[in-house]
Image (cartoon, helix red, strand yellow):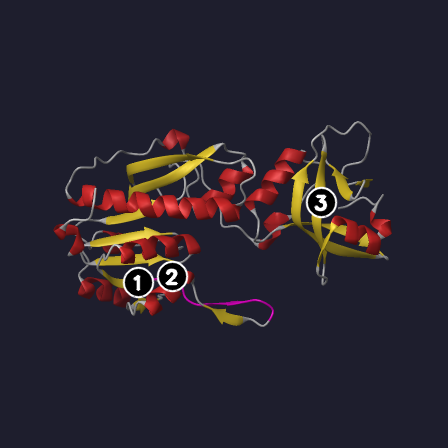
């Protein structure tokens, strides 16, 4: 349903932080929705130099000269400011903060959340990564009327898509951001016109996911090859997957920038984590099969293709990774 005169006059507060949220905000702006304020996470220090990094949503809001708010918490002053803005609708997408009831109930048309999973599955801050780690074959986007819980509000609409076996977080999040943006635009007018019904979530089907941290990428070689590969898919490009290699008397961190599954089952008996050579490729034994390490990065060094890495570190073959 296209935007109507009624929806074009809506005063909308957008709340989001990530690249997915940026795509959704950009779609609203292209359709000339009246975004009166943007809320995003406070700037954070990142990288070795600990320089302040602004969110993709803040960068886009700056470009369009939209008032930006970055509260650490929603105290009385922030809530009062939101009420002064007099929003008709709040739209939330990958924001990263829990909103108090007083904020959620401020706009007349409520507060809508765009969540990148098929709720009630994968509630929480990392639904895309968790769908990939779980080896899911489908996922999607959910439009939900927010309440005080974490992704527990009534479902307004859902849209499914298939997950490609080679999808990584990078590719799937891009696809879901485009899908979510289009889906939201289709459903805002329907919601405003009262043509969408609310449906409570089935709590017996609910699953929850935690915030992804750097150490979540640790590989344990006694897991199956498929589970390790799914972890790589879920955590590429950040934080990436890694393990440790004992070399020259010290334990060194190794990051795998690209891995793949061995096509044929391994017939030889090897220890979990044992490195072996397959022509110009590097195989690493898992609990049931092997993964192929295509691009490797030794701590403090640049990334190298398998052949180059073997040339520089011939003792890598035959070692057992931890």
Image location of residue 41, percent across then percent down: 40, 62
In this rendering, would 51 be left or right of 154? right
Per the image, the residue denoted by label 3 is 293
44 drawn magenta: yes
Q: Quadrant of residue 55?
A: bottom left
**What residue do we see at 38% from left, 57% from top?**
22
Image depth: mark 1 or mark 3 in front: 3
As displayed, is residue 186 above or below residue 32?
Answer: above
Mark 1 or mark 3: which comes first in sequence? 1
**What residue do we see at 21% from left, 49% from top?**
110
303 drawn magenta: no
* Residue at the limit of the structure toward the left, as seen here: 5
Q: Secondary structure at mark 1?
A: strand
Per the image, the residue denoted by label 1 is 38
Would you say the magenta stretch is mainly helix, strand or loop? loop
Per the image, the residue denoted by label 2 is 57
Which segment did they paint magenta?
39-48
Q: Residues within 10 Å of mark 2 (few under 14, many from 20)?
A: many
Mark 1 or mark 2: which comes first in sequence? 1
**What residue do we see at 63% from left, 34% from top?**
226
In this rendering, would 16 be left or right of 52? left
Q: Quadrant of residue 59?
A: bottom left
Q: Residues within 10 Å of mark 1 (few under 14, many from 20)?
A: many
Q: Are marks 1 and 2 in contact (CB under 8 Å)?
A: yes
Name the foreground residue: 255 vs 281: 281
Name the foreground residue: 134 vs 259: 259
């Amino acid at each position: 349903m296209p935007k109507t005169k009624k929806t074009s006059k809506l005063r909308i507060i957008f709340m989001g932080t990530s690249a997915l949220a940026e795509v959704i905000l950009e779609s609203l702006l292209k359709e000339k929705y009246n975004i009166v304020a943007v809320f995003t996470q406070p700037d954070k220090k990142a990288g070795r130099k600990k320089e302040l990094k602004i969110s993709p949503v803040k960068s886009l809001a700056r470009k369009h000269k939209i008032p930006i708010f970055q509260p650490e918490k929603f105290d009385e002053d922030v809530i009062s400011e939101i009420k002064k803005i007099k929003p008709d609708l709040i739209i939330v997408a990958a924001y990263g903060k829990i909103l108090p009831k007083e904020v959620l109930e401020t706009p007349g048309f409520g507060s809508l959340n765009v969540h990148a999973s098929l709720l009630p599955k994968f509630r929480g801050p990392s639904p895309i990564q968790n769908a990939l780690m779980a080896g899911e074959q489908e996922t999607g986007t959910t439009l939900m009327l927010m309440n005080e819980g974490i992704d527990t509000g009534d479902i307004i609409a859902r849209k499914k898509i298939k997950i490609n076996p080679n999808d990584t977080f990078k590719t799937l999040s891009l696809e879901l951001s485009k899908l979510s943006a289009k889906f939201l635009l289709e459903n805002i007018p329907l919601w405003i016109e009262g043509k969408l019904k609310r449906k409570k979530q089935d709590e017996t089907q609910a699953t929850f996911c935690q915030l992804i941290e750097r150490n979540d990428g640790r590989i344990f070689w006694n897991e199956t090859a498929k589970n390790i590969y799914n972890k790589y898919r879920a955590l590429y490009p950040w934080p990436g997957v890694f393990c440790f290699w004992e070399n020259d008397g010290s334990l060194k961190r190794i990051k795998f920038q690209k891995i793949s599954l061995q096509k044929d089952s391994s017939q030889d008996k090897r220890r979990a984590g044992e490195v072996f050579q397959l022509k110009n490729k590097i195989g690493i034994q898992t609990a049931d099969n092997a993964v192929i390490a295509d691009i490797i990065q030794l701590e403090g060094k640049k990334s190298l293709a398998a052949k180059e890495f073997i040339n520089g570190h011939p003792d890598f073959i035959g070692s057992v990774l931890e």
